[in-house]
Each structure stands twice: as structure tokens, then as C-alpha cells.
Image (cartoon, coloured by chain):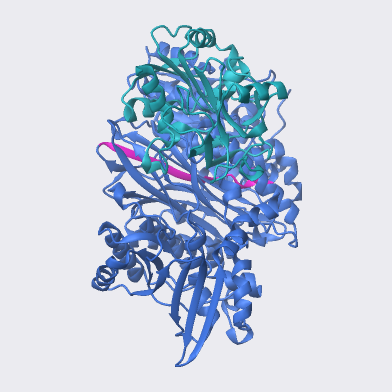
Chain colours: A blue, B cyan
């Protein structure tokens, strides 16, 4: 087969601009051949090079006393958790593949993030995910497609994570029409390692052999990185061959074999997984990091089928593959271990000193490119940004036009809200995930944050809390504030469990960056995340950017998902989210709310996606977290749950229905705002509900007072009903009440009813 | 007591089992790789949960041909304790050490949650620390835990008190809603006629420490230790 001629059309088809093509010719001093063109097209795609977002990402704080490996340095950042132990964690998207092939798209997303973690020498200990779909309710447009996508994605995540034996301990799922046809699948993985055993991805030592280990290379996932750097269109179905096919069994063997090999540090110089852009990316990046060159012969690469061209072999994204730079003389150690695990293993080349990535096929050179220029010198763009023309209009909210429901309607409304897909129990999803394997899961899915104990040698443990969060409606209506709130909410979720935050990973999901309004959202959101990270003094350890999330109907709501990991120093301080005991006092931390803008209540009840998100006072929010942690450490707190979507009433209902005991409550509220719905469903920030033993109440209130954080007893836990008395003015009085069992039924069975 | 935890290539509850045996119970326990062929000197064999060979075929269907399995059969025939948890149960059925077979859950979904499980017979080496009729809270995590056998086999399992565990509701009743996978007659765990080989789908090793929410599974291990001493 002869390679096609390099024409302007072919260049354009590879997603490269004429200017980029000129730059390539300049780098090579000649025209690229077909294989080289393919190599540049994937390495210079947004997915691999971050060419449209990198200048923005530089705003993130990435340093700190606990940072051992910085963001962008390696496959994942590493944070010191004490006693010589570190954690490597990161979040990554698989949105585009999941849109066209949900099962494999999501499964290989899990596989990819796992490899990023164990490449660092860390043992993966838990997974989480953040998912977005269009609405799945029967009367909504595209509901059948959205249900198919959700079922497929969940089954794919379960397939991969369950088999490999890494528990999926938490996550979030939200639904909105903006994700119709463009679901988001963001997968988070955390691993633990001894800091002295960190593995790096540099090819050093001229003459050292380069090993290929893992699955054989096939024609799957061809140029997947380039596919992920385009809009999704009707024709995207044709890109199904760009979706990889995962094999968790092979990955499990690869994981164990690699960790076993890493116990022989004398044999291993560098490691890099083959993810996006496969062999291409792993060879040029290791050479670039090592300030060296690398030479491989494709004829030596284990292949699934004969007759693959160099172009195909270099661009394949077949899964479960790694590149290992071995210290000369230690080849047998590597061969023996991979033989034990029955994993293909082949020496395919060596480290050179000429700075080139040289690819041969049966001894004939088929590509020769300066590694550093290819890996690190992709063009960077500062795109035009423009505040969306309709943003001011969408932020306007005239409550005079929002009819206030009568008390009887409020009564019915709560049950309906609890069954809305955004609020309903996600049990249908998480019980498909093995969330308990590795005997570490202390707080299972369904709480504010997951809490997991991780072994740190010699019968000792560290207690980690982790959460992923993003209210994309807030971001859509005020990108900077929305992104800041994502950080605040995530940190708040950790505070509720008793944890202090350590570090953050982010997954920036946005539309096509060439649209200035989309780019404005990205820019503003990055500003908001950066501000949040500085406020909580947590570094960004790495993450992922996924642009081009748009279908012909338009871009998704901007979704800068954050994942924060925290630590709980004493296991006695691990605090549940739900009511625990009859008779405990219920304390509202923060003020009674009245902000209805961008709220779930407006969307679900009034079909309004508008208004400004609630304001956030960073200092007030931080003080609240500190005070909650102090109260927990003082032993006062039986349960702690933050207030988020749905406000005070939904949070109360969640405290009642979410626990094993399903305890009711009786609370008394004084209406301070003009509207009852704003009091009950407003989403004002910096708030939480605690339950506390009656004898500890005074001490708890005094503690909050000394922290300067508002706290008031609003009622008590108990009974089988949730009763809310609202006093408005001197003698007006409204009482609302619900059977906890009815709320539970509505909340617990909703997803099953949509999906089964 | 000396324990062997068999490691098939994609076992993934092997480390959990070893942790409970060694660190929680202070037992002498070690991994035995599936390519080994001997279990000499071992008192008890544990086949852990996981996906043995990927389980793309019926779960355990390939593991039964593993080089270690003849030694497991010899140990079973010699009356040594053999405990198969989840995938281990599937492998015991596939290799003929226990009757019946485990097929895809009736819901067709993988299911992971902590459920009530009833002790049907507390007179065995695996259940001596429990009471007959006691309701335990044990985690399950499987896609193929739907126990199937012909009626004659099922009748004889119950007649011989080989059914040690069934799925039930919180009150100990075997209601249809309390059966998570469609297992015939709610079967969650059975032993062989001789009473030394147990297979069960629930994970006692995941319920052996209070901090994980339940330590109801610990009794299964302490029963074995007690019976061995007696």
C-alpha cells in the first residue's frame, strides 16, 4: 500500500491549519510524509497539546509544601500525606468516545485513568466519576437515547472497575438538555505509593533498551485524540472505529506485573503509559523529558493483525499498553515478570542521544522528528473571548413573574423534587459498581464525600475523603462565580466528613474554543477555580481539558468539574451525612437563605434556567468549614450535611431519607424573606445542617459563636415524619409535613422507574 | 492454622482475604500462585473473589483448568477446609467440588450492596459461632450469583443441611424482594456433603471489621478456627 500524497486537503483533514503545516515543515526542514503528518496531527491536537487552553491553565497554583510531583510534570501529580507516603490522583474525560459508544467509551476511560496512576508507581485504591446526560424522564426529548447512554456508560464503568478490583466509591450525576447527544464522562482515580518509589516517564541513558509491554496493537482507536478534538456531529457515528475497546483482564495483569517490576528499581529507568496517541505520545514524551532521543522499529511491536501500516501502528490507541525504559543488563528481570503474568513484552528500540524520535519499519526509517519540538512545542493560542450576548438577559430574574406556590402545593412539590433525576438516589447506578473491594470503604456512595482508609504499611492506615463537584447551571449563568462555588462546595463536602482538603484535580469540559463565547466561559471558569484554589490553599495536581463538547444543537453548559482529596487525621472524627439518633438537636449553620437565582427549584418547578447564582463570601465559607471541623474534633457532631441543590428543605429531607434508620425531624423556621419558597429552596452558600446530642448543644453553639459563624438550633431529630413549622410575622403560621417513608419511596425508586 | 489464598491472575479479593486472615485474625497465611501445583502443608484453602481469567466465559469456567486445581481437589478430598468466596464459589461449582452452577443475575446487572443473609445451619465448621436462623449483614458484589441446580439437587442440599446461607429480609424471611440475583430457593452459600468445602457469594472478609460497617462476617472465620482446635 502506498501512502497518499500530502495535499492541502489531507492536511486539513488531519485538523492542522496551513500555519501549523508551515511550522511542521520548518521543524523538519522538509515536507512531512504521511506517517509524520499523522503523528503531528495527534500530538498537536487539543487533547494532547492543550494548545487552546494551556495559557489559561498557567493561572492555576501548582506548588505547595506537600507537592512532590507537580501538575504537568508527569502522568499525574503526587502529594505527600506523611510518613513517607504519597497519593497520585487525577481526573480525565472520555466524553467523545462515550457519545458514540457509551459502554466501551466509558470502560476505556476508566482503563486510561488507572494507567495514568499506576504509571507513577502507585497502586490504584479508588475510583470516582462525574457524569452528565440529557434528561431521562419519559416525557423529555431524547429521553430514550439519554437512558441508553446512561445505562451504557454505567455498565462500562462497572465492567472495567469491577473486574480490575478498584472500588468506585463516589461521584455525581446531573441531567440537563445541554448534554443531549454529548454526555460527559469524567473519571477520577487515586493511588498510593511510597514517595521514594515514584516512577518517572523519562527516557535516559543512551543505549538503554525500550520495552513495549501489554496488549497487542490493533486498528482500534485510530487517532482517537484527534477525534476528541472536534465537535460531535451526525457524522460522528462514522468515528466509531476511533473508539478503543477495553480489556480489564489484561489491564489487571499489566497493573500487577508493572507494580511487581517496580519493586526492582535497578531495572527500570522510565515508564509511560500509552494513552491518547499511543506509541507516538509515549515515545516522543519520554525522549523529551529525558532530553534524549528514541528509536523504535515497528516490526518488533506485538500486533494483533498483519499488514498494519506504520501510520496505523503509530496512531493506534489500543488499550492496556505501556512503554518501559529498562536499564541495560536488566532485560531478563523484565522478561521474567511479564512471562509470569502472561503479558506480551518486547524490546522495540533504544534510547539515543540525537534528540530525535526515529521510527523504523523493518529497518527502514519511516518517521524522524525532533522529539522535544513534537512533544512540547505545539503552537499555543490565545483565543478571542467574549461575554455571551445573552448572559445579562439570562441573569435577570423578576420574582414577580414567578408565582409563589400555596402551602398545599409545596407539600406535593417536595416529593416530586426528591424524585427529580438530579436529586433522586443514585443507588441504581452505584450498586452496579463494586464500591467495597480492597476493604477500605468507610463511607459508601450516597454521602457528601467518600471516606476511604488506605494502607500505609505495618498495619497503619490513612483516612482520605474525596468528592467531585460542579454545579454547571451556576457556571452557565456566571462562569467565574460558578467555578469558584464548585471549589467551595467540594471543600465543604469534605469538611462535613471531618476532612481538611489537600489538593485538587480538575476536568474542564467546554464547547468549541473557536467560539469566543465558549472561550470566555473557559477563561472565566479557570479564573474562578484558580481563585478557589488560592483561597483554600490547595494546589492543582493535574487534570484534563475536554473542548469541542458540542452537538449541532449547541455547546454543553460549561462544566469545570473539580475533585478534591482531603485527609482525616483521626478515624474517630469520620462523620456521616444523615441523621443518626432520635432526640438529637438539629442545628443550621449559616443563615436562612433567600437566593433563588439559578436554583434547582426554579428549573424543576418553574422551568426557568435563569438568575444569578447565589453569592459566595470566601472568608465566610472558609470560617464555616473550620468551625465544622473544630466541632467534629470536639466530638459534638453526630451528622453533618451541606446545603446545596434544593436548599434547606431538600437537605433536611436528605438527612432523613439517606440514613439507614430513616429518622424524621421537627423543625421551626422564622420567615425572614418575603417568600416561603425562597426560604425553603433558596441555595444561599456557606450553610450546613448538623445533628448533635442535646447535652452537647450549648457547647456546639458556643464553639460556632467563637468562630464567628452563625448557628441556630432549628429543631430535633425523631419520629416518622418531617414536620416544618414556619412562622411569618406575629401570628401567621404554616405547617408542612411529610411521611419520611413516602419521601424515601419517591427518592429511592425514581431512577429505577426511569431506567427499568 | 496455615492458610493458602489462591491467586488466579485476576483475583482481586486476594489481598482482602489475606489482610483479614493475617492482620485481623493473626493467622499464618500466604498466597499460592495459580501456576503452582502443590498445597502440601496447608490446613485450609481460600479461593478469593475476583475475575480469575477475566470471566468473559462463564465465571470460573477457565479457572477450573488452572494448574493449582488438582491440588485443591486433593485437599478437599483429604477433608481440609476449602472456602470459596464469590468467584471462589463459582470456581468450586465449575470444578465439581460443589453441585450446581452460578449464572447471570436475574436483573442482568452487577449488584454490590450489604444485605441480610440468614444462617440456615449453625452446626458446621463454617458456622459454629453463629446461631441457626441468625440474620447477618454481609456485602455482595457480583454479576453472576444466580444459583441454579435441578430440583433433585436442591432437595438433597436442603435435606442434608448443606445450605448454610440464604438471602432474606431484615426479619429473616426469604421474600422475593430479598433475593438479589434470582438464586433458586434464595441460596447464598452451600457446602459439600462432607461439610469441609463451602462456597458462598457474600463476602465475609469485607465484613470483618467494625469500621467498615459490619463485622458479621468474622464469625465465619472464627468458626473455622474454633473447629480446627476442637
Q: Is residue A609 visible?
A: no
Q: Quadrant of residue B43?
A: top left
**In-image side of B25 versus A371 (left or right):** left
Tally the marks: 0
Residue A89 is a magenta residue? yes
Left or right position of A635 against B106: left
Camera-side residue of A2 and A176: A176
Where residue A283 sits in the image (x, y, percent)?
A: 49, 29
Q: Residue A487: x, y in percent? A: 42, 60
Where are the magenta residues, as a range?
Answer: A84-99
Magenta stretch holds residue A407 = no
Q: Is residue A65 above or below residue A338?
A: below
Q: Which residue appears at 34% of the width and 71% of the height?
A: A620
Vertical order, A584 against A11 (above or below): below
State the residue in front, A27 or A633.
A633
Q: Position of residue A198 (x, y in %)?
A: 34, 32
Where A328 falls versus A322 (above or below)?
A: above
Please state the horizontal and vertical placement of residue A64, each as a whole percent of the image: 29, 50
Q: Quadrant of residue A411?
A: bottom right
The image quadrant that residue B192 belongs to is top right
Q: Is residue A482 visible?
A: yes
- Classify A655 as above or below B142: below
Q: Residue furthest bottom?
A: A730
Q: Quadrant of the N terminus of chain A?
A: top right
Amino acid at each position: 500500500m502506498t501512502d497518499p500524497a500530502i495535499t492541502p486537503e489531507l492536511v486539513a483533514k488531519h485538523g492542522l491549519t496551513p500555519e501549523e503545516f508551515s511550522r511542521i515543515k520548518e521543524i523538519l526542514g522538509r515536507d512531512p510524509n504521511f506517517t509524520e503528518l499523522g503523528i503531528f496531527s495527534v500530538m498537536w491536537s487539543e487533547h494532547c497539546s492543550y494548545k487552546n487552553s494551556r495559557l489559561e491553565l498557567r493561572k492555576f497554583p501548582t506548588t505547595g509544601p506537600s507537592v512532590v510531583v507537580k501538575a504537568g510534570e508527569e502522568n499525574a501529580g503526587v502529594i505527600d500525606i506523611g510518613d513517607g507516603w504519597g497519593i497520585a490522583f487525577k481526573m480525565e474525560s472520555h466524553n467523545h468516545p462515550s457519545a458514540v459508544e457509551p459502554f466501551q467509551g466509558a470502560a476505556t476511560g476508566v482503563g486510561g485513568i488507572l494507567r495514568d496512576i499506576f504509571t507513577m508507581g502507585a497502586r490504584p485504591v479508588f475510583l470516582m466519576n462525574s457524569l452528565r446526560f440529557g434528561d431521562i424522564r419519559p416525557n423529555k426529548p431524547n429521553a430514550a437515547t439519554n437512558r441508553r447512554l446512561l445505562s451504557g456508560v454505567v455498565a462500562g464503568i462497572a465492567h472495567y472497575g469491577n473486574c480490575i478490583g478498584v472500588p468506585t466509591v463516589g461521584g455525581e450525576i446531573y441531567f440537563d438538555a445541554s448534554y443531549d447527544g454529548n454526555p460527559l464522562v469524567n473519571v477520577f482515580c487515586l493511588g498510593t505509593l511510597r514517595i521514594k518509589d515514584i516512577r518517572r516517564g523519562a527516557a535516559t541513558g543512551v543505549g538503554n533498551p525500550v520495552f513495549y509491554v501489554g496488549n497487542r496493537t490493533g486498528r482500534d482507536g485510530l487517532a482517537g485524540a484527534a477525534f476528541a478534538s472536534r465537535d460531535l456531529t451526525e457524522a460522528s457515528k462514522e468515528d466509531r472505529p476511533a473508539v478503543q475497546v477495553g480489556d480489564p483482564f489484561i489491564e489487571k495483569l499489566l497493573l500487577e506485573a508493572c507494580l511487581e517490576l517496580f519493586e526492582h528499581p535497578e531495572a527500570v529507568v522510565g515508564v509511560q503509559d500509552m494513552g491518547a496517541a499511543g506509541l507516538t505520545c509515549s515515545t516522543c514524551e519520554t525522549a523529551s523529558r529525558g532530553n534524549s532521543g528514541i528509536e523504535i522499529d515497528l516490526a518488533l511491536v506485538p500486533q494483533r493483525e498483519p499488514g498494519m501500516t506504520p501510520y496505523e501502528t503509530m496512531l493506534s490507541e489500543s488499550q492496556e499498553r505501556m512503554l518501559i525504559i529498562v536499564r541495560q543488563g536488566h532485560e531478563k528481570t523484565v522478561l521474567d515478570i511479564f512471562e509470569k503474568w502472561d503479558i506480551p513484552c518486547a524490546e522495540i528500540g533504544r534510547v539515543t542521544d540525537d534528540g530525535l524520535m526515529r521510527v523504523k519499519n523493518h529497518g527502514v526509517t519511516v518517521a524522524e522528528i525532533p522529539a522535544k519540538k513534537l512533544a512540547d512545542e505545539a503552537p499555543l493560542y490565545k483565543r478571542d473571548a467574549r461575554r455571551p450576548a445573552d448572559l445579562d438577559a439570562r441573569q435577570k430574574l423578576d420574582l414577580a413573574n414567578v408565582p409563589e406556590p400555596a402551602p398545599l402545593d409545596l407539600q406535593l412539590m417536595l416529593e416530586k423534587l426528591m424524585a427529580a433525576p438530579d436529586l433522586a438516589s443514585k443507588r441504581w447506578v452505584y450498586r452496579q459498581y463494586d464500591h467495597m473491594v480492597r476493604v477500605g470503604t468507610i463511607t459508601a456512595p450516597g454521602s457528601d464525600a467518600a471516606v476511604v482508609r488506605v494502607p500505609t504499611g505495618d498495619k497503619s492506615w490513612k483516612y482520605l475523603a474525596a468528592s467531585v463537584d460542579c454545579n454547571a447551571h451556576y457556571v452557565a449563568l456566571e462562569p467565574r462565580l460558578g467555578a469558584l462555588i464548585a471549589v467551595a462546595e467540594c471543600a465543604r463536602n469534605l469538611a462535613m466528613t471531618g476532612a481538611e482538603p489537600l489538593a485538587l484535580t480538575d476536568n474542564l469540559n467546554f464547547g468549541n474554543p473557536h467560539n469566543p463565547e465558549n472561550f470566555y466561559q473557559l477563561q472565566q471558569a479557570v479564573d474562578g477555580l484558580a481563585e478557589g484554589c488560592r483561597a483554600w490553599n490547595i494546589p492543582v495536581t493535574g487534570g484534563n481539558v475536554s473542548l469541542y463538547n458540542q452537538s449541532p444543537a449547541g455547546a454543553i453548559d460549561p462544566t469545570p468539574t473539580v475533585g478534591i482529596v482531603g485527609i482525616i487525621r483521626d478515624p474517630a472524627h469520620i462523620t456521616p451525612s444523615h441523621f443518626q439518633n432520635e432526640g438529637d438537636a438539629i442545628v443550621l449553620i449559616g443563615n436562612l437563605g433567600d437566593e433563588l437565582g439559578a436554583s434547582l427549584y426554579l428549573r424543576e418547578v418553574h422551568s426557568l434556567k435563569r438568575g444569578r447564582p447565589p453569592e459566595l463570601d470566601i472568608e465566610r465559607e472558609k470560617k464555616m468549614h473550620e468551625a465544622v471541623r473544630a466541632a467534629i474534633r470536639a466530638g459534638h457532631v453526630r451528622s453533618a450535611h451541606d446545603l446545596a441543590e434544593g436548599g434547606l428543605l431538600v437537605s433536611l429531607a436528605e438527612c432523613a431519607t439517606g440514613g439507614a434508620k430513616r429518622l424524621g425531624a421537627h423543625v421551626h423556621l422564622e420567615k425572614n424573606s418575603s417568600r416561603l419558597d425562597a426560604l425553603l429552596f433558596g441555595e444561599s452558600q456557606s450553610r450546613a445542617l448538623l445533628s448533635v446530642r442535646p447535652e452537647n448543644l450549648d457547647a456546639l453553639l458556643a464553639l460556632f459563636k467563637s468562630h464567628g459563624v452563625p448557628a441556630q438550633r432549628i429543631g430535633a431529630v425523631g419520629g416518622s415524619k418531617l414536620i416544618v413549622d414556619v412562622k411569618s410575622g406575629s401570628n401567621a403560621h404554616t405547617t408542612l409535613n411529610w411521611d419520611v417513608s413516602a419521601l424515601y419511596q419517591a427518592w429511592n425508586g425514581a431512577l429505577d422507574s426511569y431506567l427499568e | 492454622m496455615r492458610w493458602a489464598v489462591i491467586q488466579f491472575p485476576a483475583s482481586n479479593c486476594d489481598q482482602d482475604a489475606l489482610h483479614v486472615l493475617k492482620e485481623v485474625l493473626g493467622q499464618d497465611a500466604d498466597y499460592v500462585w495459580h501456576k503452582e501445583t502443590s498445597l502440601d502443608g496447608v490446613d485450609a484453602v481460600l479461593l478469593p473473589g475476583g475475575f480469575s481469567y477475566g470471566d468473559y466465559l462463564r465465571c470460573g469456567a477457565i479457572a477450573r483448568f488452572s494448574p493449582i486445581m488438582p491440588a485443591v481437589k486433593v485437599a478437599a478430598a483429604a477433608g481440609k477446609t476449602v472456602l470459596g468466596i464469590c468467584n471462589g464459589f463459582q470456581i468450586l461449582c465449575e470444578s465439581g467440588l460443589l453441585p450446581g452452577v452460578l449464572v447471570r443475575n436475574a436483573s442482568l446487572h452487577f449488584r454490590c450492596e450489604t444485605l441480610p443473609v440468614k444462617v440456615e445451619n449453625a452446626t458446621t465448621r463454617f458456622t459454629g459461632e453463629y446461631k441457626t436462623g441468625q440474620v447477618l449483614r454481609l456485602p455482595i458484589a457480583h454479576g453472576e450469583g444466580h444459583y441454579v441446580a435441578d430440583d433433585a439437587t436442591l432437595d438433597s442440599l436442603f435435606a442434608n443441611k448443606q445450605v448454610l446461607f440464604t438471602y432474606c429480609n431484615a426479619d429473616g424471611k426469604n421474600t422475593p424482594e430479598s433475593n438479589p440475583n434470582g438464586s433458586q430457593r434464595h441460596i447464598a452459600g452451600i457446602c459439600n456433603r462432607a461439610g469441609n468445602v463451602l462456597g458462598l457469594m457474600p463476602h465475609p472478609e469485607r465484613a470483618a471489621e467494625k469500621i467498615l460497617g459490619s463485622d458479621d462476617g468474622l464469625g465465619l472465620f472464627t468458626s473455622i478456627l474454633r473447629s480446627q482446635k476442637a
